[in-house]
Amino acid sequence: MERTQIYLTDEQHRAIEAIAERREQTKSAIIREAIDRYIADSQVSRRRELMHQAAGIWADREDLPEFFEELRREWDRDILDEPAESLSVGQ
């Protein structure tokens, strides 16, 4: 873990202190949790943004049915080539 210093407003400091006391955790733990949530939210937002950018990029392609059929055949070949013990479900 790396030590990082930050400046908080008085209001932020009081709020974090109150949350930490209520949860019986350290202020550092509360701040790390908040940062983790922020990072997770940012990743979800970025993923959505990329999906929206990708929407419709294959709209003009006419070879997709053949492409997906070939992809399914490749997956079927891969599955059939795997040893039976690796295909067991629920273990």
Image: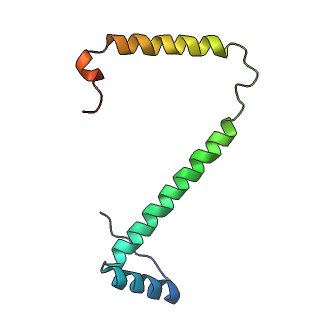
Q: Position of residue 82 (x, y in %)?
A: 30, 15
Rendered image coloring scheme: rainbow
Quarter of the rendering occupied by the N terminus? bottom left
Measuring 50% from the left and 83% from the top, which residue is drawn there? 12
Residue at 38%, 74% in the rendered image: 30
Residue 56 vs 42, above or below: the answer is above
Q: Is residue 30 above or below residue 78?
A: below
Q: Is residue 88 left or right of residue 40?
A: left
In x, y percent, where is residue 19?
A: 40, 81
Taking 35 as reference, is 21 above or below it?
Answer: below
Q: Quadrant of residue 70?
A: top right
Label count reads 0
Which of the pair 12/55 is nearer the observer? Answer: 55
**Could you tell me residue 69's position as x and y percent?**
57, 12
Q: Could you tell me residue 27's position as x and y percent?
A: 36, 79
Picture quadrant where residue 25 is located:
bottom left
